[in-house]
Image (tube, grey):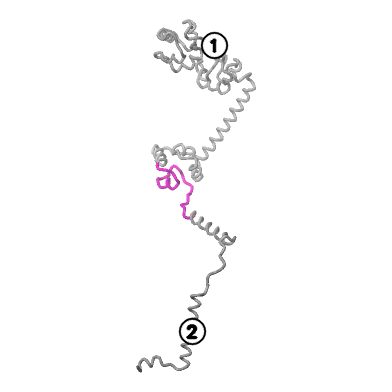
Amino acid sequence: MNFFKSHFWYHKSQRNGIFFLLISIIILQLVIVFGNFSSEENSDVNTPQVLAFHKQIDSLKFLEIENRKPKVFPFNPNYITDYKGEQLGMCIEEIDRLLAFRKTKKFVNSKEEFQKVTKISDSLLNKISPYFKFPDWIVKNSQKKQYSNSSVAKKNQSSFNKLKNKITTTDINKATAEDLKTVYGIGEKLSERIIKYRTKLQGFSFDYQLNEVWGLEKEVAEKVLAIFKIIEKPTIKKVNVNTVSFKELLKNPYIDYNLCIKIFNYKDEVAELQEISQLKNITNFPLDLYDRIVLYLVAE
């Protein structure tokens, strides 16, 4: 008993202190349990200050993402590796095309040639081509070539303008011998030969018919066609293949004696051609001449 009594025996001031402590604890517990600590005002997250703060955070995030991306420095596209190509966004097939081209000991010397070899898309080319760095001598040669091409183009245009003032027409089916002689390489004989052949054909229907003129070289023919064009196609008199005579059919500038015999033999077999395209059924018919042969024939 004395043991417990020693622990619970207090004088008056001690008892008052213990009582005050108990009251304080009870009051504090009541405040915690029944007190309202919630804020009655809701914070507005759409205020200009909050929005500006979020915008600043987003910009910082974007800068961090950009800084983490691998930087691209100027490079020679001839030496792209598999790893470098993947970083640039090229697929394996595009990289392999470039590597195969390089194995032939050739080099790409322009962004256009790079696209031609690799067959990359225009969007990817526009993205990576600003980083292409070719040797200085290639860049200088390219500039010289562009300047040279520009000078040649101006010179040709000037020459064409001069010729245009001298000729009476640019229609090859109406051009005179004097008109044709304004072309370098066309003299008296060739101009007359062109007009004579044009008369035989009843007029040029296709540009490539000019190459059929005897003695006219291809380069000279191209010069003629650079100035003179088929503006109005000729009106050609056609004959009925079913009623035409042998002699009349031979007048066709593209039908020789042997072909004429084949056509008449075929007519005897089928009695009558219903369509002119039936000529293609003839054995060993010159299909490369078909479009010109039928200029003069009709099946009726």
Residue 52 position by quadrant: bottom right
Task: Locate the N terminus and report the quarter of the image it occupies.
Answer: bottom left
Find numbered disc 1 in the image and state the secondary structure of the residue it sits on.
loop
Instruction: Determine the residue positioned at 60% across, 28% down.
Output: 157
Query: Residue at label 2?
Result: 23
Find numbered disc 2 in the image and state the secondary structure of the residue it sits on.
helix
Residue 229 position by quadrant: top right
Amino acid at circle 2: Ile
84 and 248: which is toward the camera: 248
| 161 in magenta | no
Image: 251 above or below 93: above
**Position of residue 79 measured from the top left corner of the image (x, y, whole percent):** 43, 44
**Position of residue 76 measured from the top left corner of the image (x, y, whole percent):** 46, 44
Q: Residues within 10 Å of mark 1 (few under 14, many from 20)?
A: few
Q: Residues within 10 Å of mark 2 (few under 14, many from 20)?
A: few
Disc number for residue 237: 1
123 and 194: which is toward the camera: 123
65 and 167: which is toward the camera: 65
- N-term-proximal mark, 1 vs 2: 2
Mark yes or no: residue 134 visible.
no
Residue 10 position by quadrant: bottom left
Mark yes or no: residue 82 visible.
yes
84 and 180: which is toward the camera: 84
Image: 261 above or below 32: above
The residues bearing labels 1 and 2 have C-alpha atoms spaced at a distance of: 130 Å
Amino acid at circle 1: Lys
Q: Where does the magenta region start and end?
A: 67-92
Foreground tag (1 vs 2): 2
**Position of residue 23 measured from the top left corner of the image (x, y, whole percent):** 49, 84
Instruction: Determine the residue positioned at 64% across, 22% down.
Output: 165
